[in-house]
């Protein structure tokens, strides 16, 4: 685990410094997408019939596509032969040698995108059920699936990823560890960030879907059959406290992510499985309001860990490789037990 300290900005609290209070930030990570065209019963030019002309290209699947931003940007970049490292990891640069990639984005609800490139398909599907796509994928991209499934459901999901990947194709996953830590150890144990991590982890355990994907995604990916596993773990700051300009900007974006997402992350778990008893709507909203303020306090130098994993499906003549680490099932043995939510 990468636990290298991030250098805080010594001027962050001086009167002469810029206003770094994340609560005052107006940063936005939204994008403008224009309307498409439905004509003569067809979505022009991005329906299945149109894609018959593109079958020679690479096939990419974006699981949990959300707004469809990643799928749309990758599809838009690949036909031109150019890409942005912020969108596609360097490991996938080999795809640029091709003129086209077909990108599918899938989620449980209709993505809000109203325009997509002609080589992008946004679909509604439940990936916990049997997959029905005809062609295998060269890359399956996954992000932030913590708490979505039980361990057995995750196993089934990764097996389907393996079965639907071409030999030599890749799986890539990005996960965050929802445990708020303080680099200068200034967060009291009874602070709202610490309490949130404990409460959400306990509620997730009681729901039967404990927060254990972060630790177990690597062994489960390998257990499914993938090889050549790579892991890159980093600290993600929350707020404007890092001195490095790029990390400061990343911290502000991450703060915006948590400020807007806390209610959604908290409400279902705490009102249904809260400890010791389910919380009321009012209790959750009051707690989230306090947590938003505390996360924006740069004095605490708050961060969490994030992990990017990528692995390859072996060719047919390669031997199976034993997983490098076993899946830790001790946390899920007792759904009423408390799952550890401590900083490393």
Image (spheres, rainbow, N blue to C red):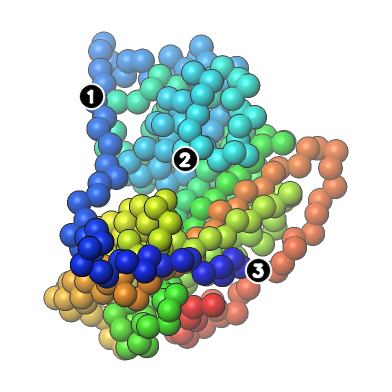
Q: Earlier in the sequence, mark 2 or mark 1?
A: 1
Instruction: Inspect this view and state whether residue 6 appears.
Output: yes
> Height in image: 211 above or below 236?
below
Q: Nearer the viewer, residue 323 or 249?
A: 249
Q: What residue do we see at 62% from left, 48% from top? A: 310
| Horizontal relation, residue 139 to residue 201: left or right | right
Q: Earlier in the sequence, mark 3 or mark 2?
A: 2
Q: Nearer the viewer, residue 163 or 261?
A: 261
Disc 2 packing (10 Å; few <14; some 14–19; many ≥20): few
**Which residue in the structure is indicated by mark 2?**
86
- Marks 3 and 1, how far apart at CA: 45 Å
Q: Nearer the viewer, residue 96 or 109?
A: 96
Q: Which of the 4 quarters of the picture holds residue 266?
A: bottom left
Q: Secondary structure at mark 2?
A: loop
Q: Nearer the viewer, residue 245 or 153?
A: 245
**Which residue in the structure is indicated by mark 3?**
327
Looking at the rendering, in which quadrant would you find the N terminus? bottom right
Q: Position of residue 193 (x, y in %)?
A: 33, 77
Q: Position of residue 219 (x, y in %)?
A: 66, 62
Q: What residue do we see at 47% from left, 85% from top? A: 337
Q: Earlier in the sequence, mark 3 or mark 1?
A: 1
- Marks 2 and 1, how far apart at CA: 25 Å
Q: Secondary structure at mark 1?
A: loop
Q: Which mark is residue 252?
A: none
Q: Secondary structure at mark 3?
A: loop
Q: What residue do we see at 81% from left, 37% from top? A: 316
Mark 3 vs mark 2: in front: 2
Mark 3 vs mark 1: in front: 1
Does the residue at mark 2 contact the one at mark 1 (Cβ under 8 Å)? Answer: no
**Which residue in the structure is indicated by mark 1?**
35
Q: Position of residue 276 (x, y in %)?
A: 31, 88
């Amino acid at each position: 685990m990468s636990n290298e300290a991030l250098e805080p900005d010594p001027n962050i609290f001086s009167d002469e410094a810029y206003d770094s209070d994340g609560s005052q930030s107006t940063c936005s990570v939204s994008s403008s997408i224009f309307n498409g065209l439905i004509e003569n019963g067809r979505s022009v030019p991005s329906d299945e019939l149109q894609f018959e002309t593109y079958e020679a290209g690479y096939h990419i699947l974006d699981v949990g596509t959300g707004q469809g931003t990643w799928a749309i940007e990758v599809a838009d970049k690949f036909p031109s032969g150019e890409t942005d490292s912020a969108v596609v990891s360097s490991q996938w640069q080999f795809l640029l040698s091709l003129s086209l990639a077909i990108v599918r984005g899938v989620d449980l609800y209709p993505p809000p995108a109203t325009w997509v490139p002609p080589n992008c398909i946004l679909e509604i599907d439940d990936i916990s059920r049997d997959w029905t796509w005809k062609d295998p994928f060269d890359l399956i991209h996954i992000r932030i699936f913590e708490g979505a499934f039980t361990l057995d459901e995750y196993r089934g999901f990764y097996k389907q990823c393996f079965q639907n990947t071409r030999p030599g194709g890749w799986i890539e996953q990005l996960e965050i560890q929802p445990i708020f830590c303080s680099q200068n150890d200034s967060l009291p144990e009874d602070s709202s960030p610490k309490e949130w991590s404990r409460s959400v982890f306990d509620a997730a355990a009681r729901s039967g879907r404990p927060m254990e994907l972060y630790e177990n995604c690597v062994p489960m990916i390998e257990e499914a059959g993938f090889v050549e596993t790579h892991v890159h773990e980093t600290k993600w700051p929350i707020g404007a406290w890092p001195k490095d300009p790029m990390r400061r900007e990343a911290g502000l974006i991450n703060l915006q992510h948590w400020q807007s997402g806390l209610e959604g992350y908290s409400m279902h778990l705490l009102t249904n499985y809260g400890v010791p008893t389910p919380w009321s709507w009012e209790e959750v909203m009051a707690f989230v309001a306090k947590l938003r303020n505390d996360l924006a306090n740069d004095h605490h130098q708050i961060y969490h860990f994030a992990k990017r994993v990528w692995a390859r499906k072996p060719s047919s003549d390669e031997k199976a490789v034993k997983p490098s680490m076993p899946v830790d099932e001790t946390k899920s043995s007792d759904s009423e037990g408390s799952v550890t939510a401590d900083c490393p």
